[in-house]
Image (spheres, rainbow, N blue to C red):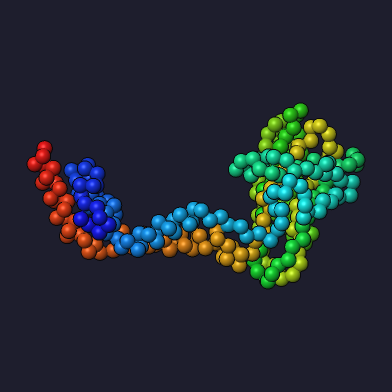
Amino acid sequence: MLEGGFGPDVIFPALISSRNRSAERRLAEVVVGTCPRRLLWVVIVSAVWLLATPARANLLLNSGFESGDLAQWTVYTTTNGTVGTPAVVLFDTGGQGVSRAAQFVVGQALPIGSLPRGGGIVQSFAMPAEDNLTISVDVASAGSAISGNVDGGVVRLLLDGFTVVTHDFGAIAMNAVERITLSVTLPVAAGPHQVGLEMVRRFVTNGATPRLYLDNFRAVTDAQLLDAPGGWQLIAGAIVGMAGVACLNRPRTGRRSLDRMLAGASKKGQTSG
């Protein structure tokens, strides 16, 4: 028996009779555990932990509108702008499946020229210390079932009232859905700050106006990314990967025993055949 209690007859029979002897030995050594048991358990437990532990760091509250409303957020309108009647609905905003999202219908309140008008939402938060901050949000523009529209909306990710990322959806077809993730990383001082998203269009709203959906707001510092389970997952994943490579390439103390067992099993197979 090799370490771990497995004999060669437990390994797949095809392994013994295969023409690729070096591949046989390599696979057999891994299967029967010539790598130390402790390292094997570390790899197994670490892999389970890496898959099971989600990252939860976020300076924003109700960031995915999980409360079912716009709690923690403040809605505003621009001059001569409207955002319709904001609501939290079920929608696939990020393309990863249906979840709760904030819905808006934005545009001019009165038809005055073609100036972009609408509104947005903001939330205040506190930076615990000076650090890099990554802010992001998933946004979708959905064309109506009535017709297409030449203006699917312009969205602006805001930090302290300043635009840091902009996206213009442009024209959108009937029943079409266009998606974007706005994201930026920049240095931010400690203290109070405000993040938000502004949405504007150049026309008044009607039944053919596209709907805008927001979901998955995040404001995360570099320190949080490191301290959060997801940050340590990346580090641990690298360590586990290197340990696995080292295990596969370390000198096999049981190689001679394995060679004898493989040879014996091969002769046994030839005799029985």
Say which quarter of the image contains residue 84: top right
Measuring 57% from the left and 66% from the top, which residue is drawn there?
Answer: 227
Relative placement, left or right, of 269 versus 46 is left
Q: Position of residue 237 (x, y in %)?
A: 46, 59
- Quarter occupied by the N terminus: bottom left
- Quarter occupied by the C terminus: top left
Residue 159 lies, with reference to residue 113, above or below; the image says: below
Residue at the farthest top position: 146
Residue nearer the viewer, 96 or 272: 272
Measuring 25% from the left and 64% from the top, which residue is drawn there?
Answer: 251
Residue nearer the viewer, 148 or 121: 121
Relative placement, left or right, of 266 versus 65 is left
Query: Can see residue 270?
Result: yes
Relative placement, left or right, of 223 versus 151 is left
Q: Position of residue 272 (x, y in %)?
A: 10, 39
Q: Position of residue 155 (x, y in %)?
A: 74, 48
Say which quarter of the image contains residue 254: bottom left
Residue 111 lies, with reference to residue 29, above or below; the image says: above
Residue at the farthest front position: 5
Q: Position of residue 154 (x, y in %)?
A: 75, 46
Total numbered circles? 0
Measuring 78% from the left and 42% from the top, which residue is drawn there?
Answer: 87
Measuring 25% from the left and 59% from the top, which residue is drawn there?
Answer: 3
Residue nearer the viewer, 52 or 141: 52
Query: Can see residue 150?
Result: no
Residue 21 lies, with reference to residue 244, above or below; the image says: above
